[in-house]
Image (spheres, grey):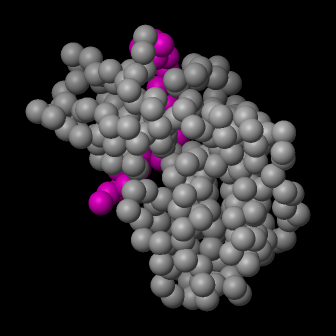
């Protein structure tokens, strides 16, 4: 058996996880989300982690899960990690290596794949999105084959210069939803709540209300069919993004309770 843990807001990391899973026999994809079981039952040949880079490091939910997950009995497994990023990959892969090392395990393979930067709260979608998706496709397929062959890569320790920037930036993200607003175009479809890995969205009279445990995946903003959810006054006119080869229903299924 093979196992991939995946965290994905708009489908980039989910797409990578799917391609890798398709290259392996008997591989299951499990979402990293609120209340995910931390005890891994069964014996696995490969165990992987696929996630986006936030502030040059791991999303909070991914880091928390990796520190808590019980991997006892998996010392013979081949561990791999793939970080999807729009800019600098930073310490994402090194952080995974360090967390596994603290558990007495080794990260055998780590790869950062440049995809589409989709942090809509900070910037608009790149005009070169289509070409970047095409280029990433090649690297994703290469990584899938390398994982199949159990290639080993050198994992560097976390960069000490990057780490303070990561800690300062990541600390702000859980409060970002306080600045989300819902416009009159909201149809009370509930898609935003079903997409939220942190279960940070409650539906009150059918309309979303945001709590204080946001993971800043911004799936609620990006994937609202009516573009009814926005951040401050910054995102109304920014282009929305979903990986073109991932269906909305697939992301909803990933985070299904």
Name the residue at the left extreme.
205
Asked which quadrant contains residue 223, the reply is top left
Q: Is residue 135 left or right of residue 222?
A: right
Q: Who is closer to the viewer here, 105 or 24?
A: 105
The quarter of the rendered structure image containing the N terminus is: bottom right
Let me know if residue 190 appears in the view.
yes
In the rendered image, the quadrant that contains the C terminus is bottom left
Q: Is residue 140 visible?
A: no
Horizontal side, residue 241 vs residue 99: left or right: left
Q: Is residue 256 above or below residue 123?
A: below
The x, y position of residue 123, in whole percent, is 59, 20
The residues colored magenta run 234-257
> Is the residue 90 above or below the residue 144 in the image?
above
Residue 122 appears left or right of 108: left
Q: Residue at x 15, y 35 (%)?
A: 204
Q: Position of residue 21 (x, y in %)?
A: 58, 67
| Residue at 58%, 47% in the rendered image | 59
Q: Is residue 148 above or below residue 179?
A: below
Queried whether the magenta region covers residue 53, the answer comes back as no
Image quadrant of residue 201? top left
Give percent across and percent down for residue 118: 57, 32
| Residue nearest the observer in this picture, 180 or 133 | 180
Q: Which of 43/161 is in front? A: 161
Relative height, residue 37 to residue 252 (above, below): below
The secondary structure that most of the magenta stretch takes on is loop
Q: Give the tally of numbered discs.
A: 0
Which residue is drawn at the image coordinates 38% and 62% (left, top)? 35
Question: Which x, y percent locates residue 145?
Answer: 74, 67
């Amino acid at each position: 058996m093979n196992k991939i843990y995946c965290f994905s807001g708009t489908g980039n990391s989910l797409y990578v996880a799917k391609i890798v899973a398709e290259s392996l026999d008997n591989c299951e994809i499990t979402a990293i989300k609120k209340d995910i079981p931390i005890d891994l039952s069964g014996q696995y040949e490969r165990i992987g982690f696929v996630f986006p880079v936030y502030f040059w490091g791991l999303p909070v939910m991914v880091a928390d899960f990796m520190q808590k997950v019980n991997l006892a009995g998996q010392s013979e497994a081949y561990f791999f990690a793939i970080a999807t990023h729009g800019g600098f990959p930073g310490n994402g892969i090194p952080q995974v290596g360090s967390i596994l090392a603290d558990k007495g395990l080794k990260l055998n393979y780590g790869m950062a794949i440049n995809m589409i930067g989709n942090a809509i709260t900070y910037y608009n979608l790149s005009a070169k999105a289509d070409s970047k998706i095409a280029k990433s496709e090649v690297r994703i397929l290469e990584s899938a084959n390398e994982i199949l062959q159990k290639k080993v890569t050198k994992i560097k320790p976390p960069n000490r210069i990057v780490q303070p920037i990561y800690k300062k930036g990541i600390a702000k993200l859980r409060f970002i939803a306080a600045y989300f607003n819902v416009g009159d175009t909201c149809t009370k479809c509930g898609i935003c709540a079903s997409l939220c890995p942190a279960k940070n969205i409650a539906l009150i009279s059918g309309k979303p209300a945001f709590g204080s445990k946001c993971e800043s995946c911004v799936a609620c903003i990006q994937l609202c069919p009516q573009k009814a959810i926005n951040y401050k006054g910054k995102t109304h006119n920014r282009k929305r993004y979903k990986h073109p080869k991932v269906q909305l229903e697939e992301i909803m299924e990933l985070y299904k309770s």
